[in-house]
Every structure is written in structure tokens, then in C-alpha cells.
Amino acid sequence: MRSADNRITAAVRARNAAGQGAFVPFLVIGDPDFETSLVLAKALVQAGADALELGFAFSDPPADGPVIQRADERALAAGITPPRAFDLIEALQKTHAIPVSLLVYYNLVLQFGVDAFYARAAAAGVDAVLVADLPPEHAADAVRAAKRHGVAPVFLASELSPPARLERIAALAEGYVYALARVGVTGEQRAIDPNLAAALERMRAATDLPLLAGFGIGGPAQALAARRAGADGVIVGSAIVRRVADHLDDRPAMIEAVRATAAALADAAHAPIEPKQKSPMPSGAVPC
């Protein structure tokens, strides 16, 4: 049964009803340290985030490119653990009632205990969890635990997802579908994959959940392009996490760089998109 009151779904729907897209920025929890990470998360909310995607640091993240891999390394070196990551989310929710989705890898969930992980996530104020290396065909235990505790299970879909995979995602997923703006690992790109629009159309035919595009959205231009391709919103990670890495020796500059980058991306995501215009009919043509 789909959770009608999922806060992420509601936030995206509200933006879409106003002709806008949702903006969901990403940070690795604990990068570069616990306290700074909490301040950065609050800065993202203040910059216009409609929800946050927060990553649990992992030593071998197969879906992530070098920018986020290094963020994971910094967080692990700073002593972050899954229990401490949940503590940060709780601290954030006490001051900012923001929808939160987690990006994790299944080894962390297994080590925590599947049911215990989702129970703790719900208690911390988590709305959704994407287990990046867990395909829907093998997700039964995680999906049961997630739904038992009112947490939306999220899955990745791409232009390569066959109809059977999209049907399975539609049957299991809640909250939203993470639509890959490009096939590969996370990282900033100069252009959106030209196949994204067609991929989103196929996903839209399979599910009525919001489609949030991520992977490769490097700036406002790519955010706008993803919206024009049909995405209901965008998820942006590396472009924001890079600002952390650029200012490791200057905390105030780091916070301002993250805030300013997020604000520009939020403006792009929230910009109304003109409806696609039909091509003009050639002179003398007769409509069929």
C-alpha cells in the first residue's frame, strides 16, 4: 500500500502544482565532521531545498564518483558511524522539519540489522531510503521492513531499465523514483543525456510516483534541462559536495559556497517550465 502522506511526495507534488520542480540537494553525513555537516544541512534548507538526500559514509560506494567517494573518506576519518548519522538527522529535524531521504549501501543495512535500520530511520525522521546497490528483485526483506515502519522504499531507474524492471519498481516503490539522468556513477556533467526525456516517458507510463532526476546534474543549466525533459524535480550531489572539498580550511567560506550553490540550483529547479510547443503545421497541411 502506497503511503499517501509521504512528505517527499507531498513536497514534490506541491511544487509541480505550482508549475515548478522540486530541489533535493545531497550531502554525505559527517563530511567534513559532524558539527559542520549539520550546519551545512541547515544551510541547504535555508537555500531553498524541498527535501534533503543524505548519504551514509561507506568505504566502497560503487554508485559514486570520486567527489562523493572522497566525501565518504572524510566522514569516515572524522569518526562518523550509522548511529551517529541518525543522531545528526534527529538534530536536524528538531530545528528544520524537512523531508529526508537516505542513500545507503546494503552492507550498512545488514550490519545494523534490516528491521532495526528502518525502525531507527523512522524514529530519526527519515521519510525514504534508497539502497543504491539493492535491485528490486532482491529487495523483499528491505521493502517489508521499510513499509512496516512507514519509510518509503526508493529505487533507481534508467533508460536501460526494461519494462519488467519498471513494473516491479512501480509495485514496490513509494515516495518517488530516482531517475538516472545518465548511466554511470555520480558526478557533474556539462549536458543531460539526450535519452532522458524518452526514459522519463517510459517511467511515467509505469508509475504515478514523482520522478526525481539525479546523477550528472552539474549546475543550474542541467537542472533546467532535466526539468524540460520531464523530471518532477532534481537531486544534486557532486556539485554541492565539491564546494565542501574546495574550502576544507575555511569553514565560513565552505558554508557560504554550499549555500550559494544550492540557492542557484534551487532557483533553476523552481523556475516555471514553459509547456512544450507543438511544431507548426506546414502550410496547406490538413490535420488528421
Image: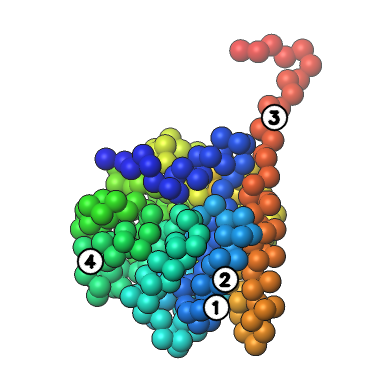
Please provide percent x and percent y for residue 213: 53, 52
Mark 3 residue type? Gln
**Element under disc 4:** helix
Q: What residue sits 56% from the left and 35% below the top?
A: 17
Rounded to the nearest angstrom, the CA distance separating label 1 from label 3 is 46 Å
Rounded to the nearest angstrom, the CA distance separating label 2 from label 1 is 6 Å
Residue labelled with disc 1? 36
The mark closer to the camera, 4 or 1, is 1
Look at the numbered discs 4 and 1 and tell me whether their residues touch, using CB distance below 8 Å. Answer: no
Please provide percent x and percent y for residue 164: 32, 44
- Residue 18 shown left or right of residue 141 in the figure: right
**Element under disc 2:** helix
Residue labelled with disc 4? 116
Look at the numbered discs 2 and 4 and tell me whether their residues touch, using CB distance below 8 Å. Answer: no
* Circle nearer the N terminus (4, 3): 4
**Element under disc 3:** loop
Q: Which of the pair 251/190 is nearer the observer?
A: 251
Residue labelled with disc 2? 40
* Circle nearer the N terminus (2, 4): 2
Look at the numbered discs 2 and 1 and tell me whether their residues touch, using CB distance below 8 Å. Answer: yes
Rounded to the nearest angstrom, the CA distance separating label 4 from label 1 is 27 Å
For label 2, the crowd category at 10 Å Cα-Cα, with few meaning under 14, some 14 to 19 and many 20 or more, is many
Residue labelled with disc 3? 277
